[in-house]
Amino acid sequence: MAHVALIGASGDAGSRILAELSERGHQVTAIARNADRIASLPGVTARQGDADDQQALAALLKGHDAVISAIPFKTSNVKTLVGAVRDAGVTRYLVVGGAGSLEVAFEEKLIDQPDFPEAYKPEARAGGEFLDFLRGVEDLDWTFLSPSAEFGPGERTGKFRLGQDQLLINDEGSSISFEDYAIAMVDELEKPMYMRQRFTVGY
């Protein structure tokens, strides 16, 4: 059992990760701007928190074994988040990443493909910048988990593949459910395989 702080616990990915953590018996401090939106689950303590307030966030993160960040990149600041984790004295930091920075061919990223939706580019670009920043961080045991291209609600099957920097594709395209993504994230928390690395999950 780990004591985990989850930032963005009421969001699409965050709420599934919260459920997975609770189901596996972890103690979770679930943080969101509106604590009323956080699911009431065993082992979960809901807390209101602002990811833009480094000092206040660090106080919420203190005393945990790990921090998981599940908030949008274009509305958050990597320096503030990493700074809060450092200030809290937590060394394990896991991030819900994006797919845009994954490679579809040698030195060709998904975000740069002609059919990549324009509306998603700001978030995808911010996610790539977040990952680039983490790659220069040597004092935290960080992990950045990128989903597949299609990332949405679905089933918890427990049947998926893992990769590193290349987009995972099968005969039906590139996808992963929030529920199976959550399994991969909590697996990495429990048995780290990708310290100071990015990895990806897909069918």
Image (cartoon, rainbow, N blue to C red):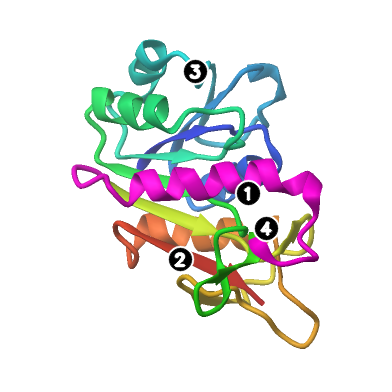
- Pointer 3: what residue? 52
38 w.r.t. 143: above or below:
above
Query: Is 123 inside the magenta-drawn segment?
Result: yes
* Stretch in magenta: 112-140
- Depth order, front residue of 10/125: 125
Query: Which label sits in the foreground, 1 or 4?
Result: 1
Residue ID at (59%, 33%): 9
Residue ID at (50%, 22%): 51
Q: Secondary structure at mark 4?
A: helix
- Pointer 4: what residue? 179
- Pointer 1: what residue? 124
Mark 2–mark 1 CB contact (< 8 Å): no
Residue ID at (29%, 59%): 195
Residue, far bottom = 171
The Cα–Cα distance between marks 3 and 1, rounded to whole angstroms, is 20 Å
Mark 2 or mark 1: which comes first in sequence? 1
Residue ID at (67%, 41%): 122
Mark 4 or mark 2: which comes first in sequence? 4
The Cα–Cα distance between marks 1 and 4, rounded to whole angstroms, is 21 Å
Q: Is residue 112 left or right of residue 189?
A: right
How many C-alpha atoms fall within 10 Å of the one at disc 2: few (<14), some, or many (≥20)?
many
How many C-alpha atoms fall within 10 Å of the one at disc 3: few (<14), some, or many (≥20)?
some
Does residue 108 show up? yes
Mark 1–mark 4 CB contact (< 8 Å): no
Mark 3 or mark 2: which comes first in sequence? 3
